[in-house]
Image: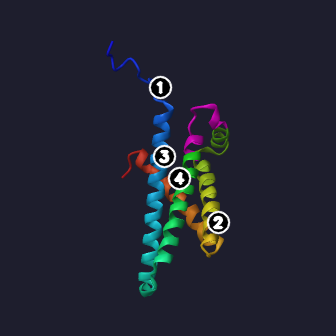
């Protein structure tokens, strides 16, 4: 009667656990993005010799923008991670992209999507689209190459 294995989920696709894992990963991405935004704001002022101009409003804006950037980047990465896997019919578009352009092409498409989102966030911050887009594009390609090397055991 009291068998703990009676109510298990052999597929591992219990929806509440998947949702909790996804939310936890999103929160982690937002926190990391916020921390990077604040650190970048503080370091950019320190490096340029303008640390005396550091203020709470500027720090809040950089932290908020970093958090939004982390959430957007997490969403794009999750979309393409799911798209790159041949698991369900929901990934048909991603599978067709991957089949058409290959693994490297998928990384380039993902990098292009990151470039557009980071370029738009750069405009919101008052910078140029190109500076944000270039950072998003090359950062995404670098992360994809790093992930490939880690996955293959290269160190």
* Mark 4 crowdedness (10 Å alpha carbons): few <14, some 14-19, many ≥20: some
Q: Marks 3 and 2, how far apart in space? A: 24 Å
Residue 96 is situated, as x and y percent measured from the top left of the image, at 67, 39
Q: Which label number is shown at residue 74?
A: 4
| Residue pictured at 38% horizontal, 49% vertical | 154
SS category of the residue bearing label 3: helix
Left or right side of 1 for 144: right
Instruction: Say which residue label 3 marks.
Output: 23
Position of residue 83 measured from the top left corner of the image (x, y, whole percent): 60, 41
On the image, which quarter does residue 134 sit in? bottom right
Distance in Å between CA atoms under marks 1 and 3: 20 Å
Question: In the rendered structure, which disc, 3 or 2, sits on the residue that comes first in sequence?
Answer: 3
How far from the left and from the top, in percent, is residue 131? 60, 72
| Mark positioned earlier in the residue sequence (1 or 3) | 1
Coordinates of residue 151 in the picture (x, y in percent): 43, 45
Residue denoted by label 2? 120
Q: Real-space Cα distance between discs 2 and 4?
A: 16 Å
Q: Are marks 4 and 3 in contact (CB under 8 Å)?
A: no
Q: Nearer the viewer, mark 4 or mark 3?
A: 3
Magenta span of residues: 80-92
Quarter location, residue 51: bottom left
Q: Are marks 3 and 2 in contact (CB under 8 Å)?
A: no
CB under 8 Å between discs 2 and 4: no
Disc 1 target residue = 11
Element carrying mark 4:
helix
| Residue extending farthest top | 1
| Magenta stretch contains residue 21 | no
């Amino acid at each position: 009667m009291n068998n703990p294995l009676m109510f298990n989920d052999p597929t591992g696709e219990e929806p509440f656990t998947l949702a909790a894992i996804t939310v936890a990963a999103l929160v982690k991405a937002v926190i990391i993005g916020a921390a990077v935004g604040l650190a970048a704001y503080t370091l950019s002022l320190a490096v340029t010799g303008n640390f005396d101009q550091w203020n709470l409003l500027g720090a809040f804006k950089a932290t908020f923008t970093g958090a939004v950037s982390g959430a957007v980047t997490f969403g794009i990465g999750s979309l393409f991670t799911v798209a790159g896997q041949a698991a369900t019919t929901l990934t048909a578009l991603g599978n067709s992209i991957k089949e058409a352009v290959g693994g490297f092409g998928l990384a380039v498409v993902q990098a292009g999507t990151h470039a557009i989102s980071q370029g738009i966030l750069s405009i919101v911050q008052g910078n140029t689209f190109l500076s944000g887009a270039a950072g998003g594009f090359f950062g995404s390609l670098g992360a994809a190459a790093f992930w490939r090397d880690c996955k293959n055991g290269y160190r």
